[in-house]
Image (cartoon, helix red, strand yellow):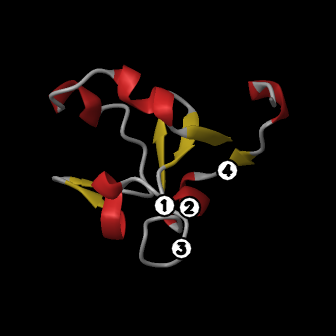
Amino acid sequence: MRSMDDLPFYTKSQLALRNGQDREEIWVAYEGSIYEVTHSRLWRNGKHYEHWAGQDLTEELSEAPHSKSVFIKFKVVGRLK
């Protein structure tokens, strides 16, 4: 398993391309980590309720009905620059 130090950095512009529309990958960021959510049924087409993929969701999580533990089941693919 890779450590966080071994993961590549991505800019917000690069993250934005993984929105479920521009590319097949669907990624979201939270607290500096970028998560692969492509295969989650809750992120079909890059949208999860009022949230859009390809973005940093750190600020938005406070409005969600769940905690940050929801990210445990997703693979970390990079770090937000």
- The kind of residue on which mark 1 rests is Ile
Disc nearer the start of the sequence (2/3): 2
Q: Identify the residue at horizontal 28%, vertical 21% (top origin).
A: 67
How far separated are the C-alphas under marks 4 and 3? 17 Å
Disc nearer the start of the sequence (1/4): 4
How far separated are the C-alphas under marks 4 and 2? 8 Å
How far separated are the C-alphas under marks 3 and 1? 6 Å
Kindly identify which residue carries mark 2: 13
Image quarter (top left, top right, bottom left or bottom right) of the C terminus: top right
How far separated are the C-alphas under marks 1 and 4? 14 Å
Kindly identify which residue carries mark 4: 10
Q: Nearer the viewer, residue 55 or 77?
A: 77
Residue 23: x %, y % from top left: 54, 76
Image quarter (top left, top right, bottom left or bottom right) of the N terminus: top right
Kindly identify which residue carries mark 1: 26
Q: Residues within 10 Å of mark 1 (few under 14, many from 20)?
A: many
